[in-house]
Image (spheres, rainbow, N blue to C red):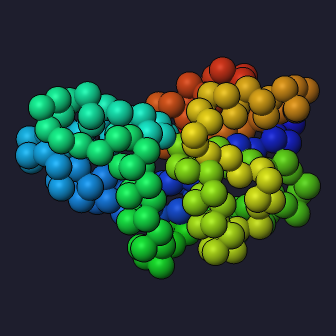
Amino acid sequence: MNSQLHIFDCDGVLILSNKLKTESFNEIAAKFVPQNIVDKFIAFHKANGGVSRWEKFLYLRNISRGYDLPDVDHLSEEFASLVDSKLNTISPIPGAREYIEKLVKESAIIYVVSGGEQSQVRRILMNLKFNIDPKRIFGSPTSKVNHFKNIRKKYQFSDAMTYGDSLLDAKCAISINSKFTF
């Protein structure tokens, strides 16, 4: 039986934004800490795809004791502004919009669950003309795990397929008994 419920990660799965976000995290961290700490922070960011920017900036603050950093909310707002200023450089993953259209024609239930900030993810996907109901596009500050659980409660008897590019995406899929495509 084909899956009726499809849950997509966003960055690196629907849109080409991983590099932009890594560069933006690097740019912000470099304002406040030396390069060795920036490198450690970027390694954490890359190893923890799908984790919210708030969690990532909390990690930066924790490894940057002794340096004067703004609070996590300020760093997150600065990150959002920096990414917003570069939105015109983000494009869809080749074939992603077409695949979504195919699923729409099959009357599939489509969700996006991202570690990115929810309103920003919605803006990006709408600007890129993805045919996905904005009310089914979720992001931080609510965790991916919680979004997945809430979606599964709504569609407990549907076969599910999750599409992701991180270990967290795979763990979320497993937690709701969904098939997973990396």
Residue at 68% of width from left, 70% of height from top? 126
- Classify 106 as above or below 65: below
| Viewer-side residue, 99 vs 52 | 52
Query: Which residue is located at x 48 percent, y 79 percent?
Result: 88
Q: Give me the residue at 41% from left, 73% from top.
A: 86
Tally of marks = 0
Question: x and y percent of residue 110 in the render?
Answer: 78, 50
* Lateral position of residue 127 relative to residue 31, left or right: right
Which image quarter is the N terminus in? top right
In the image: residue 169, left or right of residue 134: left
Name the spot of residue 123 as percent of width and height, x first. Answer: 63, 66
Residue 38, compared with residue 44, is above or below; it is below
Residue 136 lies, in percent from the top left, at 77, 50
Q: Is residue 109 visible?
A: yes
Q: Is residue 63 left or right of residue 166?
A: left
Would you identify the image quadrant in which residue 128 lies? bottom right
Q: Position of residue 78 (x, y in %)?
A: 38, 58
Residue 24 quadrant: bottom left
| Residue 49 shows up from this direction | no
Task: Please state which of residues 94 and 111 is positioned toward the viewer in this rendering.
Answer: 111
Res 40 quadrant in image? top left
Q: Nearer the viewer, residue 157 or 2?
A: 157
Q: Is residue 8 left or right of residue 77?
A: right
Say which residue appears at 35% left-offset and 33% top-offset: 58
